[in-house]
């Protein structure tokens, strides 16, 4: 059930590749503010796509609390284990 | 299917970036047809980043957005749909949940420029329904009628001020069980009460109000799929992404219907459209039509629906590749035919291309080609019509006749656009009745509206229990915030213990409920001057005269400390333009000092307490 963070990051990269015109390379340190194309509309697109692709549902307020892609991946993993 | 749409959008992005001339046309095609919210979001991204130039060449539609919800990202989905309809929206957002004041008070978005449409999504929480104890059947109905009337009066005011068409969303029904089957047995439940209000809105809305029928749209989508509690708590979304997509399509459709002429003529193929099989080959006995077989029954049912369209005023015509005598035979001799030859204003059964027949038909009936809708089960015929007479609306029927009626209905070509004369009279009657009953008085002007809110404010110094909320407002308020000074909870605690500083918070409630702690003020007393260090307010209570309450309290405290003057600073941040004129509005005089930003002063001696419609409660009972 649980996937290592590396695999989650890889899958997240494919989601991002499908959404951005110029897809950024995702690392655990990447932040939305580092990427010009990552605006509020893109943020919503990513969340909708991630919930679909990973089959997870985030709880209220927890995505906003993540500070970078690494924390976001950890959250995805947590919700895969504990929906 | 899903992947292929995504792939199509990816390919389109690449094509658009190379400057391909046809790419935007393809974009518009996709914009009209994709179904899912995530696909619309991808297209919104392309509209902004790839097709900005093409978009800027489209004609503009101006739309004011008012309501008790956030219009981001929903308005971007709507934009995509409107681009698909060939127009470019310019949106103006009203303040969150402030639509009554926006409509009744001078200024605001209704005066920020001409609007073609105003979209109003009212708050279900403002509906006041009877309690179970009060309810006796008649009271609930009367209250529902009153709610509808008040809302329609707001629409009328908005229309009178702007001449814009009003698109009014009605009320969504609750999704959860709550009352169980009892929900239908009393007007004291949201389920029944909202349905009653919606019914009243539908039956009495005047012609300039177009209803965005959320009750229907959410039922069609499924109430559970439409609901999104997380989205509400996180960012006041009206519903799930799936619902946003549905609402975007509907509003774009309403806009398009106002702008484009209505279809008048339904042109029908015969073989495998009105009956199963080919009359020229299968003969009168061989075609499928009538109650002896399931397929025959379905074709007959489709004919009944077409007949009902004729009864609504739609003109019927035939365009079929057949010998005319053969084509006429079922109309003359088949006992199960619902449609008769005399139901049709034109009958073209020949071997000419259908697009040419349509042109001749248009000339014969003296109608534009854009008044026609062509229905056929053969993709090749539909394609010819698309290529040679693109103005004609097209419906390609699927292989299963059971779906034909639904396909024609969901094409939405023959929805009525205008209400009839009789409807017009009815809406006048409703207006007269509203006036007679004095219902207008509730929202006739801003002052009586404010009085009707029965507002109560609690003004009190910072309390320990309130500090987390106060700190949160200080950290997050960007718009109504004159200085935007951020402070931690620890700093606030220090201030609240230092006699050089004054401070208070304001809570507000009204007859619709409690808004909680909505304003924070910090004063610094020094050399006979009370400086307004911080003054912020939650935007949802703008235009409620809370400003008056706050200023009275500032002056009361300053006087108590023996000050002669109150000074205020406006420090612009790019987000707080809303309070640019706050101080001058209340008689503060601009001063020389004060960089950056602007400093204002008020002599306490000259100040007379401001009048407002809010009752004050100095200390909250604990």
Image: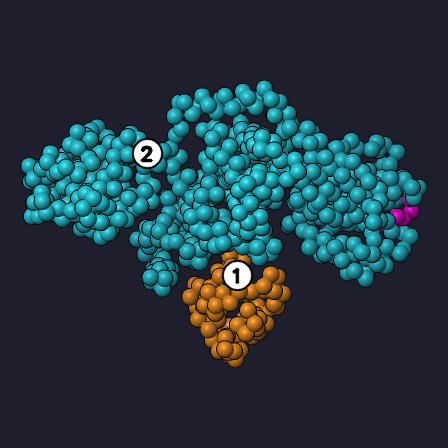
Q: Which chain is cyan?
A: B
Instruction: Give the residue pinned by disc 1.
Output: A43
Residue B139: in sight, yes or no? yes
Q: Nearer the viewer, mark 1 or mark 2?
A: 2
Residue B171 in the magenta stretch? The answer is no
Residue B173 on image: x %, y %: 52, 45
Instruction: Give the residue pinned by disc 2.
Output: B262
Tell me which corner region of the image, top left, top right, bottom left or bottom right, holds residue B46: bottom left
Chain A drawing hue: orange
- Give the side of residue B608 with respect to residue A59, left or right: right
- Give the side of residue B279 with respect to residue B588, left or right: left
Query: In terms of depth relative to the viewer, which is nearer, B598 or B200?
Result: B200
Identify which residue is drawn at 61% across, 25% down.
B439
Mark 2 lies on a secondary structure that is loop
C-alpha gap between disc 1 and disc 2: 39 Å
Tell me which corner region of the image, top left, top right, bottom left or bottom right, holds residue B614: top right
Disc 1 crowd, CA 10 A, few/some/many (<14, 14-19, 20+): few
Image quarter hosting the N terminus of chain B: bottom left
Q: Are marks 1 and 2 on the same chain?
A: no
Tell me which corner region of the image, top left, top right, bottom left or bottom right, holds residue B182: top right
Q: Chain of mark 1?
A: A
Query: In terms of depth relative to the viewer, which is nearer, B551 or B619?
Result: B619
- Give the side of residue B578 with respect to residue B587, left or right: left
Looking at the magenta stretch, what is its main secondary structure? strand
Whether B22 is drawn above or below A71: the answer is: above
The residue stretch that appears in magenta: B523-528
- Give the side of residue A29 with respect to residue B543, left or right: left
Identify which residue is drawn at 49% across, 61% down.
A48
Identify which residue is drawn at 39% across, 53% down.
B35
Residue B284 on image: x %, y %: 9, 42
């Amino acid at each position: 059930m649980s996937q290592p963070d590396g695999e989650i990051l890889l899958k997240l990269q494919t989601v991002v590749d499908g959404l951005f015109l110029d897809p950024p390379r995702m690392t655990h340190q990447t932040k939305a503010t580092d990427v010009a194309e990552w605006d509020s509309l893109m943020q919503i697109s990513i969340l909708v796509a991630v919930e679909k692709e990973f089959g997870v549902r985030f709880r209220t307020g927890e995505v906003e609390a993540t500070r970078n892609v690494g924390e976001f991946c950890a959250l995805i993993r947590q919700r895969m284990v504990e929906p | 299917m899903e992947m292929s749409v995504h792939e199509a959008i990816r390919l389109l992005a690449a094509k658009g970036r190379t400057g391909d001339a046809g790419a935007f046309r393809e974009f518009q095609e996709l914009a009209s047809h994709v179904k899912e919210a995530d696909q619309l979001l991808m297209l919104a991204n392309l509209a902004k980043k790839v097709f900005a130039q093409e978009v800027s060449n489209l004609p503009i539609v101006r739309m004011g957005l008012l309501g008790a919800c956030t219009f981001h990202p929903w308005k971007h989905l709507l934009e995509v749909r409107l681009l698909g309809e060939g127009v470019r929206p310019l949106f103006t957002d009203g303040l969150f949940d402030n639509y009554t004041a926006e409509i009744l008070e001078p200024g605001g978005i209704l005066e920020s420029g001409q609007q073609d449409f105003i979209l109003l999504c009212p708050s279900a929480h403002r509906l006041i329904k009877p309690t179970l104890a009060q309810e006796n059947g008649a009271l609930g109905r009367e209250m529902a009628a009153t709610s509808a009337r008040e809302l329609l009066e707001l629409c009328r005011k908005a229309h009178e001020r702007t001449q814009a068409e009003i698109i009014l969303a009605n009320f969504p029904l609750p999704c959860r069980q709550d009352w169980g089957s009892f929900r239908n047995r009393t007007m004291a439940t949201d389920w029944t009460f909202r349905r009653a209000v919606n019914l009243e809105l539908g039956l009495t809305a005047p012609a300039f109000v177009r209803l965005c029928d959320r009750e229907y749209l959410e039922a069609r989508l499924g109430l559970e799929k439409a609901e999104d509690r997380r989205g509400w708590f996180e960012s006041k979304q009206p519903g799930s992404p799936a619902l946003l997509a549905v609402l975007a399509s509907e509003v774009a459709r309403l806009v398009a219907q106002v702008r484009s002429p209505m279809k008048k003529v339904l042109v029908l193929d015969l073989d495998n459209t009105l009956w199963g099989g080919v009359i020229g080959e299968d003969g009168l006995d061989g075609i499928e039509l009538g109650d002896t077989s399931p397929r025959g029954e379905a074709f007959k049912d489709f004919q009944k629906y077409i007949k009902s369209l004729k009864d609504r005023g739609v003109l019927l015509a035939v365009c079929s590749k057949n010998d005319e005598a053969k084509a006429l035979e079922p109309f003359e001799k088949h006992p199960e035919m619902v449609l008769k030859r005399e139901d049709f204003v034109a009958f073209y059964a020949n071997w000419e291309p259908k697009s040419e027949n349509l042109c001749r038909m248009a000339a014969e009936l003296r109608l534009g080609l854009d008044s026609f809708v062509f229905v056929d089960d053969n993709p090749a015929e539909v394609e010819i019509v698309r290529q040679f007479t693109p103005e004609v609306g097209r419906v390609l029927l699927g292989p299963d006749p059971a779906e034909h009626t639904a396909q024609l209905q969901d094409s939405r070509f023959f929805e009525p656009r205008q209400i009839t004369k009789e409807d017009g009279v009815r809406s006048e009657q409703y207006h007269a009745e509203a006036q007679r009953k004095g219902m207008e008085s509730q929202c006739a002007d801003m002052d009586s509206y404010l009085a009707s809110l029965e507002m109560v404010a609690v003004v009190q110094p910072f309390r320990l229990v309130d500090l987390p909320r106060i700190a949160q407002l200080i950290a997050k308020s960007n718009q109504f915030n004159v200085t935007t000074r951020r402070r931690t909870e620890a700093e606030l605690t220090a201030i609240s213990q230092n006699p050089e500083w004054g401070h208070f918070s304001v809570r507000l409630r009204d007859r619709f409920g409690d808004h909680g702690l909505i304003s924070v003020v910090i004063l610094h007393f020094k050399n006979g001057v009370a400086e307004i260090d911080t003054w912020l307010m939650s935007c949802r209570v703008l235009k409620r005269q809370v400003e008056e309450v706050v200023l009275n309290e500032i002056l009361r405290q300053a006087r108590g400390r023996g000050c002669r003057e109150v000074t205020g600073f406006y420090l612009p941040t790019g987000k707080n333009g809303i309070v640019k004129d706050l101080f001058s509005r209340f008689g503060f005089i601009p001063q020389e000092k004060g960089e950056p930003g602007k400093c204002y002063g008020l002599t306490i001696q000259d100040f007379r307490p401001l009048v407002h419609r809010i009752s004050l409660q100095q200390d909250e009972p604990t």
